[in-house]
Image (cartoon, rainbow, N blue to C red):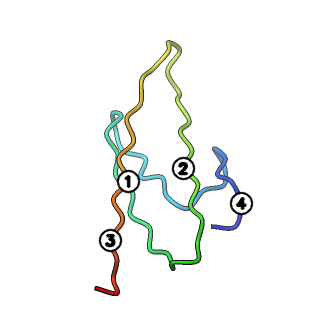
Amino acid sequence: MTADPTDADHDCRPYLGGSTETCEYESSSEDTLTIGVFGWADEASTYQIKVTWENADR
């Protein structure tokens, strides 16, 4: 990733129906990852974000 995500510029957005989405992103140990959540509903929403990090060096 080179910049913070925006609704127009991002590395992962599956565009699935509903609000359950999954993104996978390969990175090096030197990367800093930023997660952005952009809601499109008119009413307030609650989000849950789960991040799993797998160390490929093991």
Residue 45 horizontal side relative to residue 52, left or right: right
**Disc nearest the viewer among 3 and 4:** 3
Q: Quadrant of the N terminus?
A: bottom right
Which numbered marker is on residue 3? 4
Q: Nearer the viewer, residue 2 or 39?
A: 2
**Disc nearest the viewer among 2 and 3:** 3
Q: Position of residue 44 (x, y in %)?
A: 50, 15
- Pick out the residue farthest to the front: 58
Asked if the residue at tag 4 contacts the one at tag 2, i.e. Cβ–Cβ closer than 8 Å, the answer is no
Q: Secondary structure at mark 1?
A: loop
Tally of marks: 4
Which numbered marker is on residue 28? none
Residue 3 horizontal side relative to residue 45, left or right: right
| Image vertical order of residue 37 relative to residue 3, above or below | above
Q: Position of residue 11 (x, y in %)?
A: 55, 62
- Pick out the residue farthest to the right: 3
- Disc 3/disc 4 C-alpha distance (Å): 23 Å
Task: Name the residue carrying label 3.
Answer: 54
**Disc nearest the viewer among 4 and 1:** 1
Mark 4 vs 1, N-terminal side: 4
- Disc 4/disc 1 C-alpha distance (Å): 19 Å
Q: Residue at x 39, y 57 (%)?
A: 23
Mark 2 vs 3, N-terminal side: 2
Tell me if mark 1 has few (under 14), some (14-19) or many (20+) residues whose alpha carbon lies within 10 angstroms of its own. few
Q: Position of residue 3 (x, y in %)?
A: 71, 60
Mark 1 vs 2, N-terminal side: 2
Asked if the residue at tag 2 contacts the one at tag 1, i.e. Cβ–Cβ closer than 8 Å, the answer is yes
Task: Name the residue carrying label 1.
Answer: 51
Q: Secondary structure at mark 2?
A: loop
